[in-house]
Image: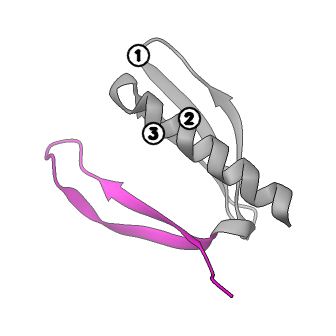
Amino acid sequence: MVSFRVVLIKASILRTRPAGVGFIDGRSDVQLTRVKVAALWSRAWYRRSDGKQLRLNFHRQWRDELQVIVKELASSQAEV
């Protein structure tokens, strides 16, 4: 059986390079809620398996990727 993971990378405000791995969660253990698509900055709340919630911000240049993430995490919840 294949186990899928969600990997969140720390971002740096001052640099264009990633700042390291933030954390790794099992895909079926997380949930994306309260997704709001806006003109410049979209946001979504990411709920980890331990119940901790993080707000994720997506600039408009990453809007297509946000839509893929929402779709993929929604499908993983449907499979459980």
Q: What kind of element bears circle 1?
A: loop
Residue positioned most to the top: 39
The location of residue 64, given as percent across then percent down, is 45, 32
Looking at the rendered structure, the kind of residue marked 2 is Gln
Q: Residue at x 51, y 26 (%)?
A: 42
Residue positioned most to the bottom: 1
User: Distance from label 1 to label 2 (Cα)?
Assistant: 15 Å
- 3 and 2 marks in contact (CB < 8 Å): yes
Please state if 43 lies on the left or on the right of 50 as rendered. left
Q: Residue at x 63, y 83 (%)?
A: 2
Please state if 77 lies on the left or on the right of 37 as rendered. right
The location of residue 63, given as percent across then percent down, is 45, 29
Q: How many marks?
A: 3
User: Distance from label 3 to label 1 (Cα)?
Assistant: 14 Å
Q: Which residue is mark 3?
A: 65
Please state if 38 lies on the left or on the right of 78 as rendered. left
Whether 41 is among the magenta residues is no
Q: Residue at x 69, y 60 (%)?
A: 52
Q: Which residue is mark 2?
A: 67
Q: Which residue is mark 1?
A: 40
Magenta-tinted stretch: 1-26
